[in-house]
Image (cartoon, rainbow, N blue to C red):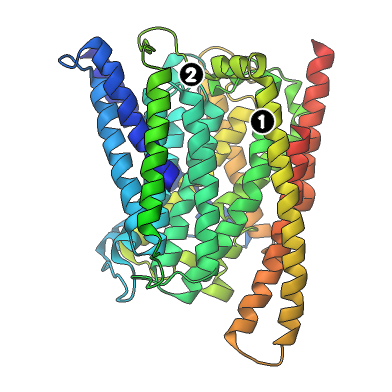
Amino acid sequence: MTLAATAGQLASGATTTAAGAHGFLSPTGVEIAFLLVGLVTFGAALVTVTTRQLVHAALWLVVTLGGLAVEYLLLTAEFIAWVQVLIYVGSVVVLLLFGLMLTRAPIGRSPDADSGNRWAALAVAVAAAAALVWVVVDAFRTTWIDLDGPAAGSTRVTGQSLFQNWVLPFEALSVLLLAALVGAIVLSRKATADAATAATGVKEATTATDVTEATEVTDSAEGRGGAADQADKGGVR
Amino acid sequence: MNDALDVTLRLLIVFVVFLALPLIVGQTEHKVMAHMQGRLGPMYAGGFHGWAQLVADGVKFAQKEDVVPTGADRRIFQLAPAVALLPYLLVLLAIPIAPGEGAVGQAIDAGVFFVLAVMGVGVLGSLMAGWASANKFSLLGGLRTAAQLLAYELPMLLAAASVAMAAGTVSLPGILDAFEWWWLPWQIVGAIVFFVAGLAELQRPPFDMPVADSEIIFGAYTEYTGLRFALFLLAEYAGIVVLCGLTTVLFLGGWHGPWGADGLGWVWTLLKTAVLAFVVIWLRVTYPRLREDQLQKLSWTLLVPLSLAQIALTGIVKVVIQ
């Protein structure tokens, strides 16, 4: 959530500088749209972290991530925008909602959806946002995207720069993801073994928790298969 | 001004198609299912072989009271049908039916990614409905929907990636421009994986565990009545149109056909889509529902390995023919 908030701030920061170079008095429609979408994204991010209703937070996260995709589109990075929707909105949030529904997501306010650490979290978020905005503004102060020229973020251009200039970081990231997947498999195996013993332990007590735990066991078993297959995919890629 | 007119016209056509084709598929389903089961199906509404049955259904749905359960999360409950339906409208914009600029709502550079990404968003509607209904059957339906989506999104993506590799582009018209007839046997495994995974994503039989009526009433849609329920149903049939159209475009060569190259491309696209839609209906009548564990097993142990093998095959052939 911090990241999303940060990116929202970051986006509006970048616009201001870019507009500064070309004059504030004649903003184009795209710039105005960019700023407005940035505001909406930022607002949605704020609601995500402040709402007391867990599922609402996940759904506001959808708005935030969707807003970021629109910002990418406005920056002509079409490929990145669709991948953002595909992975974050389509998969990560669905996984998040799945987890919320499996555990406990009451309708209405969750009393434990608040943390005593919120001021520390705010400080960290503001510091991270300031650092990121400063770095990005400093790095791209003079960069200007020509919207009328050839698309700078089309799939072809992105693919070429990724596999010609940035192959090594790309492969390093793949290995990092692979390591994370293997780690997840190891953790889930351990958790499954623990949960299995726990489940047999409470088998006598015919309560609803029994059923829940059994579901979770089967579920993590399925999840394990999934993680293994995704590891395959990472390996192939 | 001309641009605005062009855009409006395109949007209008796509919207009409979006409203008409799902109804036609729905009516065909009524009749085909009936004849496969030795019945006649709807015969009265509209006079000729009950052609207006779905129009009458629509009128009925519109007259029903729109009930929101007391314990439900009102706003999310009411928003869910729109979230389920709109993505299919957006996807329809990107599907080309004939060669040239004029035959696609909007040519999108990363078309394959666009359609798969937006189709994935539609499932959020079912999840929202399942959670916000405050009903345990709905919640179970929502959970099953999410589990099913997570399992079947990957093989679908991999199968689509195989075609993109073969064509060397991720734009849908671009893929069709590069199409040759021998792609059909070359990509047949990918085509089957894509179609099956798509059926599972739409929760159509035999993958209708999330709405299994004998166990959980109607899954995430249990509490819905009237127009909102009709919107969910419309989303299902729009999903069939979109899935069949996408399979046609990606794997069956879209507007390419053995005869009638010029001007008749759109007929081929529609014909292939219609045949696939018939297969979807046929499967509903002939196959029993898969159990939840069989469903997960089919995806992870069969479809994902098959799609990976298809990608490997595509890569090898691609390197050899260059």
Q: Which residue is mark 2?
A: A153
Which residue ends up furthest to the left in the rendered image? Answer: A25
Q: Is residue B24 above or below residue A35?
A: below
Q: Is residue B37 left or right of residue A127?
A: right
Residue occupying the point 55% across, 64% down: B143
Q: Which residue is mark 1?
A: B161
At label 1, the amino acid type is Ala
Residue occupying the point 27% across, 11% down: A21
Q: Position of residue B29 (x, y in %)?
A: 53, 52
Query: Image quadrant of residue B86?
Result: top left
Q: Is residue A174 left or right of residue A124?
A: right
Same chain for the residues at labels 2 and 1, yes or no? Answer: no
Query: Which is more toward the observer, B198 or A181?
Result: A181
Query: Which is more toward the observer, B224 or A78?
Result: A78
Q: Position of residue A62 (x, y in %)?
A: 41, 47
Q: Is residue B294 left or right of residue B139?
A: right
Q: Position of residue A177 (x, y in %)?
A: 68, 40
